Image (cartoon, grey):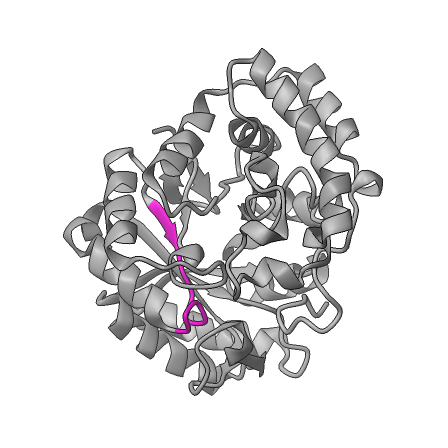
Amino acid sequence: MKTRTLGKDLEVSAIGLGCMGMSHAYGGQDEASSIRTLHRAVDLGVTFFDTAEVYGPFVNEELVGKALKPYRDRVTIATKFGFKIDTSKTDGSAMVGLDSRPEHVREVAEASLKRLGIEVIDLFYQHRPDPNVPIEDTVGAMSELVKEGKVRTLGLSEASSDLIRRAHKVHPITALQSEYSLWTRDPEGDILDTCRELDIGFVPFSPLGRGFLTGKLTSTSEMAAHDMRRNMPRFEEANMAANMALVKLIEEMAAAKGASAAQLALAWVLAKGDFIVPIPGARKIPNLEQNVAATDVELTSEEIAKLDDMLSPDKIAGARYGATATWTPKR
C-alpha cells in the first residue's frame, strides 16, 4: 500500500478505513464480520482507521480497539469528540447537541482511551465546531492532552478556513476531516487552499457519496429501516433518480479504464492532492479490497477535468443534509 503524510509527520496508508458503518448509521451490524474486515484491511496494508465516540454511540470505538489490538504497533487510530450524547438512545438521535467545552474534551479523551484499549490516541479530532466555545479554548484543552502523552496529533472536522487558522495558532493541526467526493465539493477553494498553505492533511469522509457513487444503491427500499440516508435529501427517490444518471456516466468512464465506479471516484479524490487521504467505509471484504485497489488507478488531467465537469455542484440533486440535522456544520 502506498503511503501519504498528514501534517508534518503522520504517515498513513494512502487510503484509510472509515469504521462508522460497522456500528452506526446504516443498519445491519455484525461484529464478527466487521472484525474480519478490519483484519483484512491490515493485511492489505491499510494503517489508518477512523472512529468516534458517537458511533453507536461508543460501541464502534470498542469494536475498533478489540479488532486492532493485535496490530497496535502497525496502525494509526483516529477518533473524535464534540457531541452531547443521550446515553438512553442507541441510534443517530443520541446526538442531542454540541459540546466542545475544555472539561468535556478531557472527559471524552479519557473515555475513548479506555474503550479503544490504547495508551495514546494517534489523531484526536473535534467532530464539529461548537459555536458556544471559542476554538482557542477547545484546542488549548486538546493540546494539554498532547503534552500529557494521551494524544499524539490534533484534527478538526467540517471547520471553516478561519477556524482552522485560529486553531493552528494554538497548536499545530495535523488533519482536517470533511466530506469530499465527486458529489460534495464544498471544501474546494478556500478550505483546501488553507490546508495546503498550512501543511495540514485533508481526510475526506464519505468519498463514495455514502455508497451512492458505487452505482450499487438505486432505491431507498434497499436501505435498512434505521439507515440515516433515508433522512438525507439526496437520497429522496426523485433526487436519487436524477443523480443516478450522473453515476451512469462514472460507470461508463470507469469501464473504459477497466475499473469500477467506486475506484474511479476514489482515484479522483486521491488525484486532488498528495496531502489527501480518503477514508471510505466498508463492512464487507470485497468492497474493502476494491477500495484499496483504487490506489492503482491513474487519472490523466483530462480525465480529472471531465469528471469535474460531469459532476459539477450545480448538477447534483438534493442538499447534503436536512435542515434539522444535529451534525450539520456550524460555521
Q: Quadrant of the C terminus?
A: bottom right
Residue 297: tell me if it is visible. Answer: yes
Q: Quadrant of the N terminus?
A: top left
Q: Which residue is at a point 72% across and 54% down the rendered structure image?
A: 236
> Residue 303 or 253: which is nearer the viewer?
253
Q: Is residue 16 above or below residue 263?
A: below
**Is residue 98 found left or right of 121 in the rendered image?**
right
Instruction: Where is residue 54? Give x, y as percent.
Output: 45, 71
Question: Which is the main secondary structure of the residues drawn in magenta?
Answer: loop
Q: Which residue is at a point 38% across and 48% down the rendered structure image?
A: 283
**Is residue 61 found left or right of 52 in the rendered image?**
left
In magenta, the rendered stretch is 48-57
> Residue 232 or 115: which is nearer the viewer?
232
- Snapshot quadrant of residue 295: top left
Q: Which residue is at a point 45% across and 86% down the rendered structure image?
A: 103
Q: Is residue 299 above or below residue 245?
A: above
Instruction: Where is residue 329? Give x, y as percent.
Output: 67, 66
Residue at the right extreme? 314
Residue 188: tell me if it is visible. Answer: no
- Snapshot quadrant of residue 95: bottom right
- Magenta span has 183? no
> Residue 161 or 277: which is nearer the viewer?
277
Residue at the left extreme? 70
**Is residue 28 found left or right of 117 in the rendered image?**
right
